[in-house]
Image (cartoon, rainbow, N blue to C red):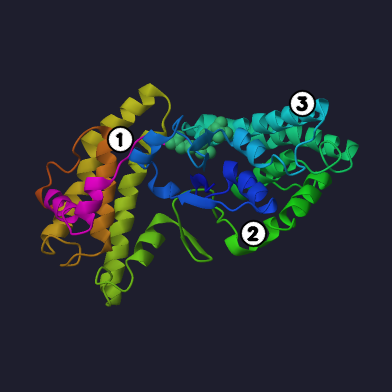
């Protein structure tokens, strides 16, 4: 029966399942949805609870990562026959998921102040609370949770790897946990899978976007935009023109910073005050200058379309979403430019199909 595992092109909740499937030599289709373009609205509608991982075996469909991991581990010696041992493993895996839920709470927090507070608790308390206990259980049971390898060690290793990748936590303090990571990632099947898969990219400065090309990873949106525009006429050959564009995008980003300050302000009174300043002063300060720049250069920053016009257009779209107004409305050349960029071949089709539905990671 054909087996399929749907998840994102990241490790997180699906990696333990992938490890178990490889270790137990089960053939399966490892279907990876692009997290950058999620949600795939039509596909999401087909998910029983709107979330992945999803496991499909013929006409059988299963969601919930733990149910999937346990199911694919059956008949493999990774599930003990003894009811008490099974219960200890169930308890352990739910303790691991309590930890997972606390890191998710941090990742999902949008309010920067609350997020900082959660981060402090996470690093100073939560990690040690859970991992000192997992370490103790491993010490007491010969390096495993119930004395021999089970499906739950795979779950722990997946969660530890995610923690290292996304939070940079050092597990030196927990040698048995570290040993387990080494043991599981060197198991036959798992080792070959990891070698073929390669490393997952980290977030170099803890923030998106990142751009990945083979084993190369780049952060900073402007560096990425400029890089993906290379070898096209969106980047001029002339050094002065390049510098004018660099200056233009940095001016656009200075404007964008004020939108960021507004978005991240959690106090509703301060937020309202920031919105007032943006609408009454900031927009005109920047947009009258952008308008003048465009007027002097035939409607573009350097007389023809470049990567900088894409940056302006995208950040105007973002501003309009956050502020609920049309920031460019009093600046005819800026407005015309936005329309031009949005109607470019490729861009127009992309806009017609894109979706910004809420992503709950
Ligand atoms: N309890 C579920 C949680 C599943 C879950 O939160 N999945 C996330 C990715 S880790 C997801 O699919 N998010 C996409 C969305 O909500 O649109 C499980 O263990 O499978």
**Most foreground residue, 140 or 240:** 140
> Total of numbered circles in the picture?
3
How crowded is the residue under tag 2: few (<14 C-alpha within 10 Å), some, or many (20+)? some
Q: Which mark is residue 118?
A: none
Mark closest to the chain's N terminus, 3 or 1: 3
For marks 3 and 1, give the CA distance: 49 Å
Would residue 118 appear left or right of 148 to someone viewing this image? left
Q: Which mark is residue 87?
A: 3
**Residue depth check, mark 3 versus mark 1: number of the one nearer the observer:** 3
Residue 300 falls in which quadrant of the image?
Answer: bottom left
Q: At which x and y percent is residue 204?
A: 55, 55
In the rendered image, is residue 277 in sight? no
Q: Disc 2, ligand 1: is the CB inside 8 Å?
A: no
Q: Which mark is residue 322?
A: 1
**Most foreground residue, 206 or 212:** 212
Q: At which x and y percent is residue 32?
A: 48, 50
Would residue 8 appear left or right of 249 to someone viewing this image? right
Would residue 150 appear left or right of 21 to someone viewing this image? right
Residue furthest toward the top? 269
Q: Which mark is residue 194?
A: 2
Please report the residue visible at 74 percent of the width from the left and 27 percent of the height from the top: 91
For marks 2 and 3, give the CA distance: 30 Å
In the rendered image, is residue 236 in sight? yes
Q: Is residue 315 magenta?
A: no
Q: Which residues are magenta?
A: 334-361
């Amino acid at each position: 029966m054909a087996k399929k595992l749907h998840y994102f092109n990241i490790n997180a909740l699906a990696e333990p399942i992938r490890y178990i499937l490889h270790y137990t030599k089960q053939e399966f289709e490892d279907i990876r949805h692009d997290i950058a373009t999620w949600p795939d609205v039509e596909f999401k509608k087909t998910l029983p609870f709107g979330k992945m991982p999803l496991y499909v075996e013929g006409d059988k469909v299963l969601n919930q990562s733990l149910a999937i991991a346990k199911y694919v581990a059956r008949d493999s010696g990774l599930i003990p026959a003894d009811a008490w041992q099974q219960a200890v493993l169930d308890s352990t895996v739910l303790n691991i998921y309590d930890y997972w839920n606390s890191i998710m709470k941090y990742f999902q927090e949008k309010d920067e102040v609350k997020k900082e507070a959660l981060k402090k608790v996470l690093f100073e308390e939560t990690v040690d609370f859970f991992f000192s206990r997992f370490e103790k259980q491993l010490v007491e049971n010969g390096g495993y949770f119930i004395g021999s390898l089970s499906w739950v060690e795979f779950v722990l290793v997946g969660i530890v790897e995610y923690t290292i990748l996304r939070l940079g936590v050092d597990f030196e303090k927990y040698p048995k946990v570290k040993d387990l990571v080494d043991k599981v990632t060197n198991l036959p099947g798992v080792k070959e899978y990891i070698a073929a898969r390669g490393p997952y990219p980290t977030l170099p400065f803890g923030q998106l976007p990142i751009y990945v090309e083979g084993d190369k990873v780049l952060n900073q949106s402007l560096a990425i935009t400029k890089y993906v525009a290379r070898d096209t006429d969106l980047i001029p050959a002339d050094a002065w023109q390049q510098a004018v564009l660099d200056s233009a995008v940095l001016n656009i980003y200075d404007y964008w910073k004020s939108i960021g300050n507004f978005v991240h302000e959690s106090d509703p009174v301060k937020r309202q005050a920031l919105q007032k300043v943006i609408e009454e002063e900031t927009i005109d300060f920047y947009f009258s200058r952008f308008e003048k720049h465009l007027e002097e250069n035939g409607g573009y920053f350097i007389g023809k379309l470049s990567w900088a016009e894409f940056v302006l257009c995208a950040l105007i779209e973002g501003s309009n979403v956050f502020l609920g107004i049309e920031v460019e409305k009093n600046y005819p050349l800026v407005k015309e430019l936005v329309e031009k960029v949005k109607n470019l071949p490729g861009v127009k089709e992309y806009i017609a199909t894109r979706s910004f539905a809420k992503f709950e990671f």
